[in-house]
Amino acid sequence: MNQTLHIFAKDTRRFLPEILVLLALLAGQFGIHTYLCATDARNAFSNPDGSMQLITVIFFLLTFLIPVGWWLLSSRVVHEERLVGDTQFWITRPYAWKSLLAAKLLFLAAFVDLTFLVVQCSMLAEEGFSPLAEMPKLLVNLLLITCLYLLPLTAIAAITSNFARMTLTLLGALLAFGVAVAIAALIYGPTISAHIGNRILFALAMAICIAVVVIQYARRKVWLSRILLISFPVLVCVIAWIAPDQRLMNRIYPVAAAGMAASVHLSESLDADGAPTPTAIGTMTLNGNEYRIISVPFHLSDLAQGEGIVTEGMRSTVEAPDGSRWSSPWQPLSGTYLPGDTEASVNFDIPVAIYEKYKSIPVTLHLDLAYSRIQAGKSTTVPLSTEKFSVPGFGICSLREENGALNCRSAVHRPPLTLISANVSGHPPVGAGKVEVGSYWVGSLESDFSGANILPSSDFTVTSFHGADNVGGALRFLPPGTPITFTPYQQASRAQSSVTLTNFHLPTQQQQ
Amino acid sequence: MNSTIHTENLSKRFGHTDAVDGVNLAVPEGAIYALVGPNGAGKTTLIKMLMNIIRPTAGSAQVLDIDSRRLTGKAFNRIGYVSENQELPEGMTVGGMLDYFRAFYPTWDCALESQLVRQFDLPLARRLKHLSRGMKMKAAFASSLAYRPSLIVLDEPFSGLDPLVRDELIEGLIELAPETTIFLSSHDLAEIESFSSHVGYLEDGRLLFSEEMSVLSDRFREVTVTLAIPAPLPAELPASWLQPQTEDCVLRFVHSDYNEAASAREVAERFPSARNISYDPMSLRAIFLAIAKSHRGSAASQPVTAQEVKA
């Protein structure tokens, strides 16, 4: 511990100028943020006042420069006792590798993590949040910052000898990763597994970075560490190639066991006369391949009160009378449905050649749907106001009178999946139109892992509500004082349901 | 006597090149051992293996009774290492570097540190990056002597230094580390001759011999035989007679296994008509030149090999 603190103190003295530059960037960000909070104009790009636009640009420039400062600082502190080469003074001195590594981590924790956390807390307090109440989110964000920025930077610094080489290696690593992701996308296309795979790759990347750092400090096996880092983009492709799509999906989204009722029931969508609702078709080109997008309506039932579903993926299987069949991979599908929603639609992509083969014959279409079942939490109803009002667990909102939009700010990340609902009127002047229940979904089921955020909060604006008639999209005017309800939803479980449409004809009329 | 450094078949291969090839070496405790050899002989590679900077391809080395591959961390409390290629914490001042290193060594002697600073005339307030090469080397010496290490390993420490600095360093080394085992490499024979107690000769990665300096000096003589009439070089001379050559009535060679009585008898028997035979002691430089030239000539390589590793 003494050696750790001794090295830490030396590094602190040695890199005081760099530390001060980083602190100046953070202080600048905090100062401008305070000013923007006072003028309520953090997103002032649309502000006609040129000086405000300039200040906003500087704010975002500082926000960009802070990670650059981390990059520089991590390079300087690791390269001070560099791990590549055989002429460094420290390798024949009584350094304990654990102490050296601990000193470097302590340095980064103190001057990157801690300073960032302090500034985030201060900015959140300026915005009206309680930093203490938001501490779990802040710490998760800090962990993500450490994993996504600091750890890869430290790993790359550990296998390079100076800042220039580190920069080139970093650019090379980003390029290699980009190429690998592109190759993986070519191999596998846009699949829900890619979304799940991202988590596997994230864990893999973290494991590799940690291994590289430990190997370098413990043994200085530079080539082994470099091979490990190079293996990552290769693994991205390999995982895309061998990912057990169906097994993975069945594990994450279990099919309801026999005799157990699924939480949602899917059936063919029929019109008032009992005829199937018409299907639609579009076109899409992906990675140079042309696809037909088939849109199939279906009927939803059995959703219990207080529950809902969030669709996340789907897979389609087309089977012809002659026994030939085609199955798509699992594809992403987004949609949120509550008990009142009975009609939904599924879009799936089918290669042109397959489409041409089956378009003129009746087929059996089997759709598997992967979804999360969501459970409503405790609702909060507050009167709408042009002044800032706080919604517990959600954020701080206010009504902008000039356009009737609801501006909200959530601490650190996007809020949890929340349904905002109110009685809304469709036509100005206020209260003149038909009043109906309007709603709007915001947030995400996985808000805590939506990525590291350098800003202390996330802003979003609700400009439109979907009305009860489900027409959607129209701007609804909300008079001040209107009770507005925020209902958070939590993930209860994941499941799969399916629907089989027999004697199905692939649509032929193309829509643009 | 205990060996501070002991190697067994220590080898290092880079690709298809044997940088160090089966070196067996023993450095006695308290010795000042000079490893000499031409540039590219493998001296630095051997030292780097001893210091666990690089790993041997084969064989093993014990340094202060520790396997060199386990030489890390606290083991360096007892070892001082200075190399011509070694980087120093350039951003620090000399005083800052000494302050920094002081905390690493439980045996750091502040009085000795002060003495070294005075003796080497080190400017404590100046940054290392602003020092001359000689001054940097002095600073490195001071930081490696102040904790009274049991072993000091020096890799070409005097290379490129002016004679004054070199003498100051040698003086400091001998005066201030009297009980320390010193292992140093050099390709400059003159600079190590005055103070080394043991010497080893490395060429093409192979240790041609390793022995005490006094034994080496006693073993080598430049023999001059003056004959009555000019004569060609006799065939089948003993293998220990290196670089034999004749010029008119004079025959010269280097005797690599000289023994006063036996050698005089042997030479006299070979040249009964000799008018005069002289046996002149050789400088270390002359000995090594003779060995190096003999080793490079295939016919003369065997006698030296026969003397290998006497220490």
Image (cartoon, rainbow, N blue to C red):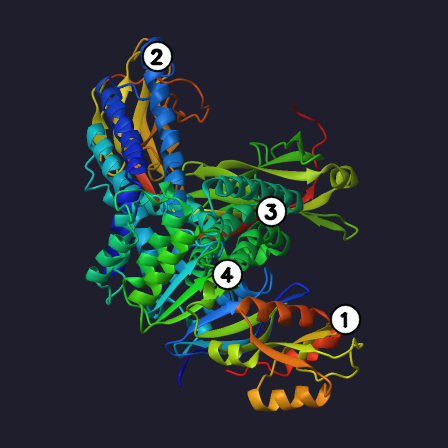
User: Toward the viewer: B299 or A348?
Assistant: B299
Quick check: can you spot residue A93?
no
- Rate crowding at label 3 as few (under 14), some (14 to 19) or many (20 or more) other CA atoms within 10 Å: many
Residue at 60% across / 33% down in the picture?
Answer: A277
Label 2: which residue?
A47
Residue at 35% across / 64% down in the picture?
Answer: B173
Residue at 71% across / 34% down in the picture?
Answer: A288
Quick check: can you spot residue A332?
yes
Which chain letter goes with mark 4?
A
Label 3: which residue?
A315
Q: Are marks 2 and 4 in contact (CB under 8 Å)?
A: no
Q: Earlier in the sequence, mark 4 or mark 3?
A: 4
Tell me the CA gap for discs 2 and 4: 55 Å
SS label for mark 2 = loop
Q: Position of residue B219 (x, y in %)?
A: 55, 81
Q: Amino acid at mark 4?
A: Lys
Q: Earlier in the sequence, mark 2 or mark 4?
A: 2
Give the quarter of the figure containing the C terminus of chain A.
top right
Label 1: which residue?
B248
Label 4: which residue?
A221
- Rate crowding at label 4 as few (under 14), some (14 to 19) or many (20 or more) other CA atoms within 10 Å: some
Q: Earlier in the sequence, mark 2 or mark 3?
A: 2
Q: Which of pointers 1 and 3 indicates the residue nearer the eye? A: 1
Badge 2 and badge 4 both on one subunit: yes
